[in-house]
Image: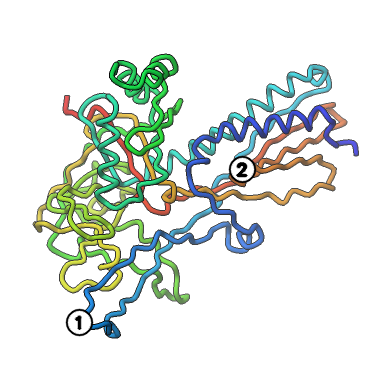
Amino acid sequence: MSNAFNKEERVAFENLLEGFQDALVLSRNVSVYNSDSEMMERAGDTIWRPMPYIASSINAAPGVDISSSFPDNTQLAVPATLGFSKSVPWTLNAKELRDQLQEGRLGDAARQKLASDINVALMNVAANQGTLVVARPSAATGFNDVAEAEAIMNEQGVPSYDRYFALSTRDYNGMAGNLAGRENLVANLTKTAYEQAYVGMIASFQMFKLDYANRLTAAAGTCTINTTGAQVDYAPEATSTAVGGQINVDNRYQTITVTDSSNVKAGDAFTIDGIEAVHHITKQSTGELKTFRVISVPAGGTTLVISPPIIGATGTPTDAQAQYKNVEVASTSATASLNFLNIVDANVNCFWQKDALEILPGRYAVPGDAGVAVMRASTDQGIEVVMQKFYDINTMTTKYRLDTLFGVVNKQPEMSGIMLFGQTTP
């Protein structure tokens, strides 16, 4: 076949795939859901993925009869979409193809870019939707910083295994520098920190260094919220009834009314006076204010879409409110302040529990008998890479393209978060 790949190209593709898999550092540390391609096409490339269940218990009356105490369990779900279709195209003419290294270098660059696209997509979701926020007053120093992230996760009942932390290079190296200077630590660990700026595992988190990082600018908004009413009693529901029947509900977000949203932006992090975080299983207050993120700012100047929703379960809560209660309304006020935590521009360092973030590998149905040479392979995570080649006899030019299709979803924003350093008013 005129457009078939030769042996050298096949070997190059195998080497490219190996390098691609090595570069997918972050995708190896999130959960993976492999969907059915035919079903995804019929569903518009969107599937609803279940959020982790939260169970509740009751105090049994004397004896064993609890026949009147069976609550309804509400299973919440979130939409996950194959929303990223990344492609790297390049061409080589008949003269350039005389140098086989040319083809290899371009393939390596394509592999590097696609792997970066996947890692960046994961970090964007984690950075913009993680709701556990730790604001540190100084630069990164080491254990005490990470211990704060561990504390906020432990206090709210996030599973203690499979925890990961991705930091910008400067913040990561700041931690490595602190570790390198501790003579009382294990000699080899201190030496590795000094020679390779390597941190390893700290306070139950496996640490990773990024060569890029999102930036979050300082908040400029000033507003209050009325916490005496229904705004602190969001009611989760699996489905709602619309004109077309029952539809799924995404319960990660809530629209709240504030006095002035004109200077608030997506990404801002805040606490609310009198709204404390609770342990998601025991429902006991942690004594610490719950952290929230702004997801979007609708037009109008008085509403914000935030995450997570404020589920106070006050008064006579529904079974779903009691099950998913995430705050203790310690005090109420018609003018409770939103206290913004990102008061200085800073890099966004992300931490998460593996089940919070999920990647959905997709698949292209590229025909192999349409005059174009096709090779495909999948990584250990199921992410498929497709390489195609087409020769144009008119220009003696060979076209190549490397493609991948995937989706990323934050199933549980309350199991992922961000850390901001240097958050002290200048």
Left or right position of 409 against 140:
right
The residues tagged by marks 1 and 2 sit, at their Cα atoms, a distance apart of 53 Å
Q: Percent x, y for residue 371?
A: 85, 43
User: Does any portion of residue 186 appear in the rendered image?
Assistant: yes
Q: Nearer the viewer, mark 1 or mark 2?
A: 1
Residue 139, disc: none
Element on which disc 2 rests: loop
User: Does any portion of residue 255 appear in the rendered image?
Assistant: no
Name the quadrant of the N terminus. Answer: top right
Q: Coloring scheme of the render?
A: rainbow
Left or right position of 62 against 376:
left
Q: Nearer the viewer, residue 313 or 90?
A: 313
Above or below residue 1? Residue 190 is above
Task: For label 1, count other residues whose C-alpha is less than 10 Å away and answer few (under 14), some (14-19) or many (20+).
Answer: few
Task: Please state which amino acid type lies under the numbered disc 2.
Answer: Asp
Q: Residue at x 24, y 27 (%)?
A: 422
Q: Residue at x 43, y 40 (%)?
A: 124
Q: Residue at x 24, y 49 (%)?
A: 155
Q: Residue at x 34, y 30 (%)?
A: 347
Q: Nearer the viewer, residue 85 or 65?
A: 65
Q: Percent x, y for residue 210?
A: 44, 28
Q: Nearer the viewer, residue 234 or 156?
A: 156
Name the quadrant of the C terminus. Answer: top left
Task: Please state which amino acid type lies under the numbered disc 1.
Answer: Pro
Task: For label 2, count other residues whose C-alpha is less than 10 Å away and answer few (under 14), some (14-19) or many (20+).
Answer: few
Circle 2 sits on which residue?
380
Q: Percent x, y for residue 392?
A: 83, 32
Circle 1 sits on which residue?
62
